[in-house]
Amino acid sequence: MKPIIRAGRMKPVHSDIRGPLFVEAMKRQKQGIDILKLNTGNPATFGFGLPDSIKNALMEHMQDGVGYCDFKGMPQARQAICDYETSKGIKGITSDDVFIGNGVSEVVSFALTPLLNDGDEVLVPSPSYSLWGNSIYLEGGKPVFYTCDEKANWYPDIKDIRSKITDKTKAIVIINPNNPTGVLYPKELLLEIIQIARESGLLVFADEIYDRLVMDGKQHISLASLTEDVPVITLNGLSKSHCLCGYRCGWMVISGPRELTEDYRQGIIQLTSLRLCANTMAQIVIPAALDDMETPASMVRPGGRIYEQREATVRELEKIDGLSFVKNDAAFYVFPKLDVKKFNITNDKQFAHDLLDATNILLVPGSGFDWKDPDHFRIVMLPQADILSDAIRRMGTFLDGYKQK
Ligand code: PLP
C-alpha cells in the first residue's frame, strides 16, 4: 500500500501557537523544566476561575439540552445573542439571523465554505490570528494580506486594502479588537472599511471576540452597527470574555439586506444542519453569560487582572533597549518590535527558540501571525502581574548582548 499523503491545500496551513516550538517546550516540561507559556490566550489555565453566573446557570439547567437542538442553536441562546448584538447597535436582526457553533473557530468555516470558490480572494489583516488565513486556504480560497500599520497604532492601511482588491475579492476580514496587536479600532476607520466593502461589493467578516475586553474607558463599536446596506457577518463567543475557551462556544450573526445574503444563508443552513447542532452544554450558559457583563468588566478596569497585567508588562517592556511596542487598549496581547539590526535577527522562529533555550519562556514569533518580517513576537499577558514582570525582566537580560547566529 502507498503512504497516505495529506491534501495539497494543507500546504500553506500553519499553526505556530501550538507548532513545533510548542511541542519542543512541552517535551522540556515533561522533563521537569518549568516553562512559562506566553503563547496561548486561554485565561482558565492562568487561574481565571469559572464565573459564578456560569456556575449557577449550569446547575439550574443541568437537565436541559441533552438531545440535539435546532441546528442554528438553542432558541433561548440565540435570542440572548440577538439581544446582545442588538444592544451593540446592530439593526434589523432577529434570532433567525444567529448561528451558534463550537467556538468561533468552527463558525469561521460555516462562514467561508458557502462563499468561496477555488481561487477566490479574501482580504485578511497582517498581522492576524492565523485562524482566518488558514481557514481560507482550507476552503480553496486565497487570503490576500493587507497591512496593519504599526506607525499608525496598528490600524489597517486603507490605501493598501484598496490596492489589493481584484475581481476575485469576495470579502474582507476585520479583527477588532485585534489579535495579536490588542488594538481597538475607532469609528472613522470602521466607516472607511464599510465604504470599501460598499464600493466593491464585499461581504465583511467582523471578528469581535474581544469586544468585552476593552480598557482605558474606551468603547467597542460593532462594525455592523454602522451600516444597514452592507452585509456583515459578526462573530463572537464566550472563550475570552467569560474565560470559557474549553466550552467551545461561538456564534455568528448575519446583518444587512436579507435579499443580498439569501443564497449564501441557505449554504450556511445546509452546512450547520449537516453537522446536526453545536454542543448544547455550552449553549445553556449563553443567556446567563450575556446577562453578566460584570465578569469581563471586572477584569479590564484598574485593579482588574487583565488591566494590571498589561500595566506590569508594559512597564518592564519600556525598559528594554532595542524593543518598541504599541500599548494595547484591549484584549491581553501585545506585539513588540525587535531592532533586527541591533540583534542581528533574520529568523524570528530562531529568536523564539533561542529565548526558550535561555529563559524557558515560550512565545509565538510574528510569522505565526502572517507577519512577513522577522521583527515581531506576541506576548500573552495572562499570568499574574508579578510573574509577567519577572518574565519581561528576564527577556531584557536575555536580549542584553543577544546576537542571532
Ligand atoms: N478569533 C480570534 C481573533 C481569536 O483570537 C480566537 C482565539 O484566540 C478565536 C477567534 C477563536 O475563538 P474560539 O475559542 O471561540 O474558537
Image: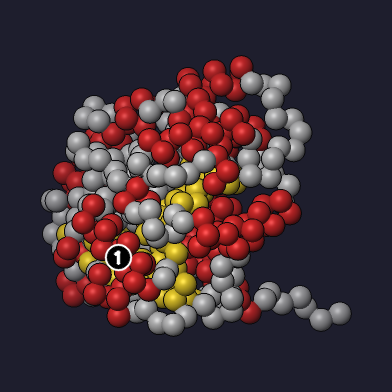
The residue lying toward the viewer, choosing from 153 and 304, is 153
Regarding residue 397, the answer to whether it shows in the image is no
Q: Quadrant of the N terminus?
A: bottom right
Q: Which percent across, then down, holds residue 403?
A: 24, 71
> Three-letter amino acid code at disc 1?
Gln
- Above or below — where is 201 with respect to 386? below
- Left or right: residue 374 compared with residue 71: left
The residue lying toward the viewer, choosing from 382 and 328, is 328
Regarding residue 204, the answer to whether it shows in the image is yes
Q: Which percent across, then down, holds residue 17?
A: 46, 57
- Left or right: residue 40 compared with residue 10: left
Q: Quadrant of the C terminus?
A: bottom left
* Residue 13 image-quadrant placement: bottom right
- Residue at (31%, 73%) from the top-left corner? 161
The residue lying toward the viewer, choosing from 322 and 311, is 311
Per the image, the residue denoted by label 1 is: 195
- Above or below — where is 119 with respect to 352? below
Q: Residues within 10 Å of mark 1 (few under 14, many from 20)?
A: some
- Residue at (32%, 30%) from the top-left corner? 297
The residue lying toward the viewer, choosing from 337 and 236, is 236
